[in-house]
Amino acid sequence: MRFLGAEVAQHGSYHGPGTGCCMGVKGHAVQAIFGSLVTQAQRVLQRSGMQIRPIGPHQNRLGAAQGTALLLFAISFVAAWIHWSDTLYLLLTHRTDTLGYYQFLPGFFLERDIYCLPWTHEITPSRLLSLFTIGVAILQLPFFMIGHVLAVLGGYVTDGYSAPYATAQLVGAAFYQGCSGYLLVRWLGRSIYPRVVGAAVLVLVLSTPLHYYTAYEPTMSHGYSFFLISALLYLVDLWVRQPSAWNTFLLFPLCTMVVLVRPLNGILLLIPFIYRASDLHSIRDRLLTLRRWTRATILGSMVSVLLIFPQSLYWHSITGKWVLFTYGVKEESFDFSAPHLFDVLFSHQNGWFVYSPLMIMVMTVLLWQAWRKESGARTSLVIWAIAWYFYGSWWAWWLGAAYGFRGFVEYSALFVPPTIQLLLWMSAVRIWWRYLCVTIVVGLIFINVRMSYIYQAPWDGPDWSWRKYVDKVQESFFVPGP
């Protein structure tokens, strides 16, 4: 089995460290970091003295995936409920991007009018354009229907914005978060002890703004994009290892949804072609696989067209264009000649490393893996670098009114492998250094969770300074500011 371009060993049965046995490994490992990761994981588990039942790899992976999913769901929903339970009526009506993504559902299903949506850009007094795509609304649709049924049964206002609708969307956001964890563990659990993967996923979620965007702004696009990217990684890995008509068919609607939820994430469509690809011949083989399953390719393409058509029809009915860069209507654009690459990472204006300092270590590991040509790190690095350049070139590179740099939130799925390596390195050092590493990780998680809790927009703009940022860090530790 390969992992993003590198061969890794297939593991057999796991045996508990308490029995004195090591996990069985079948096959061979060639130039893969996960060969060493498995060995390190064994040593860590043996030192911990954990008693684990001898179970098969499928059962082990499934149990860890379910446990990770339940934990992520619970954390996201409980945090969201604590924050929103007293103001549910505001969740879906707040006039920000959150309303922009959601408004298609009540507009289409309840008001029967999508040309007078509440959060739009006025082209002319009679032409109002929503700048947002319908992908998030498609994913929210099942929970919108549940909320509508609850509103009818409970006697609430059935306008799409009352408490039952809001509660259903909180559940929906937490559900997709849990599904993300499940898919990531199933994807990487084939190559490394699944509980280590689950721990890495939890650390990434809780130490980055991903936690904020699934608990406190759950109807933003980022949590849904994280789910779709996790699903794409899982499906592409399955498609490459076990190509079939069904896997080929599913690729098309999934890739379409990645773009419909957040168009800039279209760069992730590189993954089906470069995942596990070592040269141009490998990419050609992917194209031949699509040709091999011609019927599935055609049917998948038809479903993609059906998903895209409502969006294109909406654009055409308002602007006369079937394909539209909506922000261009507002004369907002990219300046590719002068990207703010350093600022995106280190500025007090939502800099990625400033609000997600753990990612400094994770990216260091990813660069080390890329230099060593291990575990397909170059694939993740190239995709992230393209996104970095695009966001740095955007006129509002800081992505205002945001907690941290939200543009990279969904890319956390790509950083699970180096996070696994980082955690295993931390677990393999001497005990006192291990305690220090655990303290640092827990501290970073605590800061992120607390700052997510106390955040009130905006933490950016001309009045936002390093001094104010430090004051918020102090407040997160319950230390009074000046």
Image (spheres, helix red, strand yellow):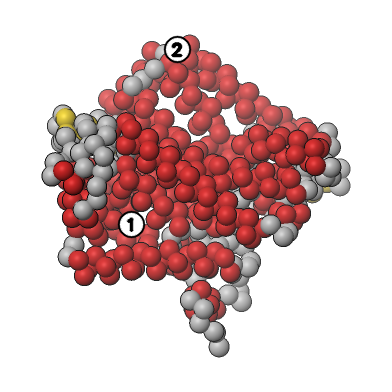
- The residue to which callout 2 is attached is 294
Q: Amino acid at mark 1?
A: Val
Picture coordinates of residue 269, whole percent (x, y)? 45, 35
Q: Is residue 68 left or right of residue 257?
A: left
Q: Amino acid at mark 2?
A: Thr
Q: Residue at x 53, y 16 (%)?
A: 299
Estimate how packed mark 2 is, as few (under 14), some (14 to 19) or many (20 or more) residues with alpha carbons within 10 Å: some
- The residue to which callout 1 is attached is 362
SS at badge 2: helix
Q: Residue at x 78, y 33 (%)?
A: 109
Q: Which is nearer the eye, 19 or 88?
A: 19
Along the polypeptide, which appears first: circle 1 or circle 2?
2
Q: Which is nearer the eye, 422 or 317?
A: 422
Q: Is residue 283 left or right of residue 179?
A: left
The residue at the far bottom in this view is 482
Picture coordinates of residue 411, whole percent (x, y)? 44, 48
Picture coordinates of residue 161, whole percent (x, y)? 77, 47
Q: Quadrant of the N terminus?
A: top left
Estimate how packed mark 1 is, as few (under 14), some (14 to 19) or many (20 or more) residues with alpha carbons within 10 Å: many
The alpha-carbon separation of the residues under discs 1 and 2 comes to 40 Å
Picture coordinates of residue 470, whole percent (x, y)? 49, 78
Q: Image height check: is 469 above or below 380?
A: below
Indicate which label's residue lies in the foreground, 1 or 2: 1
